Image: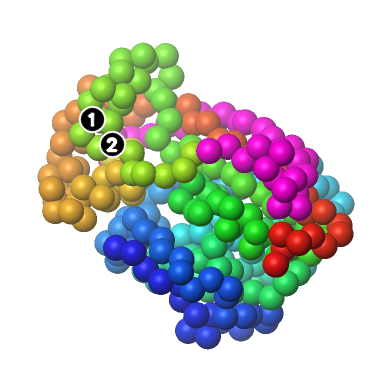
Amino acid sequence: MPNRPTDAAEAPGPVTGLRAGPATDVRIINHFNSQEAAARYAGNRPQSHGRVLGLVESILGAALPVERALDVGCGTGHSTVALLPLARSVVGLDSSRFMLAQAAQAPAIAYRSGYAEALPFARSSFDLVTVCSAYHWFDQEKFLQEAARVLRGGGWLVLYKVGSTGKIANNAGFDTWKREVFRTRYPKAQRNDEVLTEEKAIGFGFHDVARERLTHCVRHTLNEYVDNLLTHSSLIGAMDRQQESVAETRRWLRQELGPYFGQGSADFIHEDWVHLLRRDLSASECSG
């Protein structure tokens, strides 16, 4: 259900540069705002964040590690932990207290409750801001305005996505099943998949550094893949609306997917992408 932004004062953790946040009218639906969904996400979501961030690390080179990084829409902290090689201290921010309760802990990491559209931090608080597989849930213009505000001049913005459903290598039948059977039963939740163009980025004080796509192959067992699918918003939505139980969904997935897994496992090709941008050195009006 819709939630209101959390005031920074409510969130635990010793993070400096906090502010109450500029927006009081943000309404965001969080599909992962339950204890059960968060627990499944923490335990069963594939973690290839380091692979993508390794590419960012190779591009930025001597500019790393930065002093402070912010991971927006951090969920259960998979992407936050993956940032540790790139920054001396990291803040993970998410609007779901249930996801944050499951987040992986580390001495250099602090977690905050808050919204991408109303970041509860002062101007120029961070050297690096990242978003993994969450940009499509945001009011993107409000987020870009906020990212420009909390980044120092010359800081970096990284938008990236790690693929988690993938395709079975050399198996067109699986693609057909996924499109015609799986998506008919579980349509994608409403989101904004618009690509951030260079022209639009410039309007918010950013310029492109790199855009890359990567692929990698992973062998999944049937049970691993089913448990992964149970972390996705389309299935969570069906279960939250009580159309079916978790057990019913798991049984249906195992029955449908079984023929594609041969001896109990299959090789999947996953596609990731990354968009690296740099904050203009000079201040701009869009930074608020």
Q: What residue sits right under mark 1 in the picture?
A: 184
Please provide the residue range marked out in magenta: 194-223
Residue 63, image x, y percentages: 84, 54
Dot 1 amino acid type:
Thr
**Residue at (49%, 31%) from the top-left corner?**
270
Q: Is residue 7 above or below residue 106?
A: below
Dot 2 amino acid type:
Pro
Q: Classify residue 261 as left or right of residue 198.
A: left
Position of the N terminus by quadrant: bottom left
Q: Inspect the magenta stretch and tell me whether residue 219 lies in it.
A: yes
Residue 21, image x, y percentages: 57, 75
Q: How far apart are the two marked residues, 1 and 2, measured between alpha carbons?
A: 6 Å
Residue 209 disc label = none
Residue 198, image x, y percentages: 71, 38
Q: Is residue 77 above or below residue 257?
A: below
Q: What residue sits right under mark 2 in the picture?
A: 187
Residue 95, image x, y percentages: 44, 67
**Residue at (54%, 42%) from the top-left corner?**
161
Q: Nearer the viewer, residue 227 or 31?
A: 31
Q: Residues within 10 Å of mark 1 (few under 14, many from 20)?
A: few
**Residue at (58%, 69%) from the top-left corner?**
119
Q: Residues within 10 Å of mark 2 (few under 14, many from 20)?
A: some
Q: Classify residue 189 as left or right of residue 282.
A: left
